[in-house]
Amino acid sequence: MLEVKNLTKSFESPSGKVTALENVNISIKTGEFASIIGKSGSGKSTLLSMLGALDTPTSGSIKVDEVDISKLSASKQTVYRAKKIGFVFQQYNLIPNLSALENVMLALEFGGMASGKRKKRAVQLLEEVGITPDEMLRRPTRLSGGQQQRVSIARALANHPSIILADEPTGNLDSKTGKMIFDMLHSLSRKENTTILAVTHDMDIAGKTDRTFTLKDGKIAV
Ligand SMILES: Nc1ncnc2c1ncn2[C@@H]1O[C@H](COP(=O)(O)OP(=O)(O)OP(=O)(O)O)[C@@H](O)[C@H]1O
Ligand SMILES: [Mg+2]
């Protein structure tokens, strides 16, 4: 269960205070697939970075299985990110000088898996998302966008996260590949009862999720 209460985030900018999120209240059940839509600048990425403990709220609480993650110490937040959260970004964010396989193995290392077990688990994850043995050994620049996004999904799923946070995961892909990637994310997370929160601009995709939240000027629109 993910429970966000009265979440507000403001930034100081040279021209004054920007309120990116204002009194956001949402709750998402374990295993639910929710989408977030809203215009550019409405606060979607800010919301995901709060949920992933990449940044701290100005006020309000974010409870994941009853624990308020915004109140954890920095070191506990790092553990929370590595073990409980899987991130998928529009720009894939793979490490350029590591192969696909090494990218996934690194996530397993951060998740605390013993070194002798990482390779087998990484290969299995990459197979699940349809990456061939040859592709596994390539660096990200030698893979297509769709293949890179599959690798980043394998990486996101590596440590059996309870929540996947996806910020426009199909934003750089053609619509057919995008739908395939979304379906893959959906079915893999169903299998493990993972909660997903995905930002999208594609209304067809949003329509397929269990629930859609709309952000407007930092507030949840009703
Ligand atoms: N670090 C920051 N410092 C100052 N203002 C910020 C910062 N991050 C975000 N903002 C502002 O907060 C608001 C929400 O930004 P956010 O990135 O969450 O929007 P978004 O909905 O993800 O937009 P997009 O669809 O373009 O990705 C914007 O007005 C943005 O300029
Ligand atoms: Mg954004």
Image (spheres, rainbow, N blue to C red):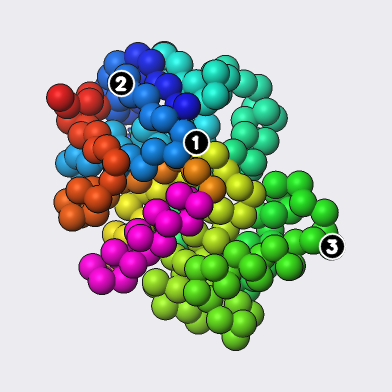
Residue 60 location, quadrant: top left
- Helix, strand or loop for disc 2: strand
With 89 as the anchor, is 138 left or right in this view?
right
Residue 168 appears at what percent x and percent y? 32, 52
Residue at the far front in the pictured view: 191
Residue 204 in sight in this render: yes
- The quarter of the picture where the C terminus appears is top left
Q: Mark 1 points at which residue?
A: 52
Which residue type carries mark 3?
Gly
Report how far apart the C-alphas of labels 2 and 3 lie in the structure: 44 Å
- Helix, strand or loop for disc 1: loop
Q: Name the residue under label 2.
A: 24
Label 3: how many residues lie within 10 Å, few (<14), some (14-19) or many (20+)?
A: few
* Residue in front for this viewpoint, 66 or 155: 66
Label 2: how many residues lie within 10 Å, few (<14), some (14-19) or many (20+)?
A: some
Q: Does the residue labelled 2 lie within 8 Å of ligand 1?
A: no
With 218 as the anchor, is 56 left or right in this view?
right
Q: Mark 3 points at which residue?
A: 116
Residue 182 appears at what percent x and percent y? 35, 59
Segment tinted magenta in the rendering:
174-191
Which residue type carries mark 1?
Gly
Residue at the far bottom in the pictured view: 134
